[in-house]
Image (cartoon, rainbow, N blue to C red):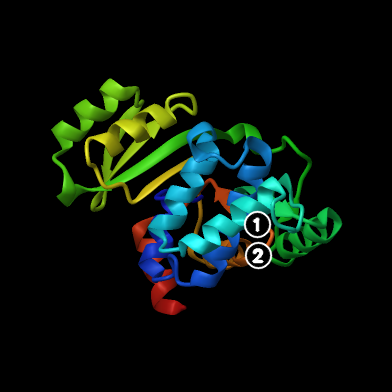
Amino acid sequence: MSGHSKWASIKHKKGAADAKRGKVFTKLIKEITVAARLGGGDPDGNPRLRTSILIAKSKNMPVDNITRAIKKGTGELEGVQYEEHTYEGYGPGGAAIFLEAMTDNKNRTVSEIRAALGKAGGNLGENGCVGWMFEQKGLLTVKTEDKSEDDLMELAIDAGADDLKTVDEHYEITTSIENFEAVRKALEDAGVLMELAEITRIPQNTVSIDEKKGKALLKLMDILEDHDDIQKAYSNFDISDDVMAAIIENN
């Protein structure tokens, strides 16, 4: 999973979230470039580009890097042409895995993904084999210390959000894809500081994983998210706090 889902929470506990700044920048530059190529270089008329820029700025990406990425997308500067692809398969314990990729060489990417899944005891499947398990949603997160739950709930729901729940020290706001931009703008206009604002994929069911399979699965997810061509990696695994504590202790 991505964002502040189960996978993100686990990464935080492992101390791995956003540890590789260079990788984060590379993936964001790809996203900005593709967003600009598909929807134009004006963020006011391109919601996907606008969201990508906001995320890049939240990661402290220099403005010059953002500007160059946009110009490569619009063709003002020469750059690599990336294609978007999705890949689906299974990991250890039968966990479903859904990958969003941007690549300049599809054959290389699919070969490397197949090898990574196979080495971990999983396999690459056909398109559609697990995609139905994940629902695309807008996801926005806000620190609990920045806003009261009642105030944020009223603001978000009035703007069209589907739900708000508290997860650890954050509020998670979910929206439909159609209402994502309206909710994001409502929070921004109200001065609410968002830690995350993105389109994500939320699993509709989960698979419980034991310690042995969990260790292999977490290693696989790290490898997949670290891959240059993979923008986001999602899974539907569920690891209990006790099992997670054992994995960290014995790692």
As drawn, the residue found furthest toward the front would be: 76
> Quadrant of residue 156 in the image?
top left
Could one spot residue 237 in this view of the protein?
yes
Residue at 72% x, 64% y is: 116
Mark 2, secondary structure of its residue: loop
The residue that mark 2 highlights is 227
Residue at 77% x, 53% y is: 81
Residue at 59% x, 42% y is: 41
Residue 122 in percent (x, y) is at: 70, 57
Contact check, label 2 and label 1, Cβ < 8 Å:
yes
Residue at 26% x, 47% y is: 193
Residue 210 in percent (x, y) is at: 49, 59
Residue 104 in percent (x, y) is at: 79, 56
Mark 1, secondary structure of its residue: strand
Rendered view: 135 above or below 72: above
As drawn, the residue found furthest toward the bottom would be: 250
The residue that mark 1 highlights is 230
> Quadrant of residue 220 in the image?
bottom right
92 or 48, which is in the foreground?
A: 48
93 or 184, which is in the foreground?
A: 184
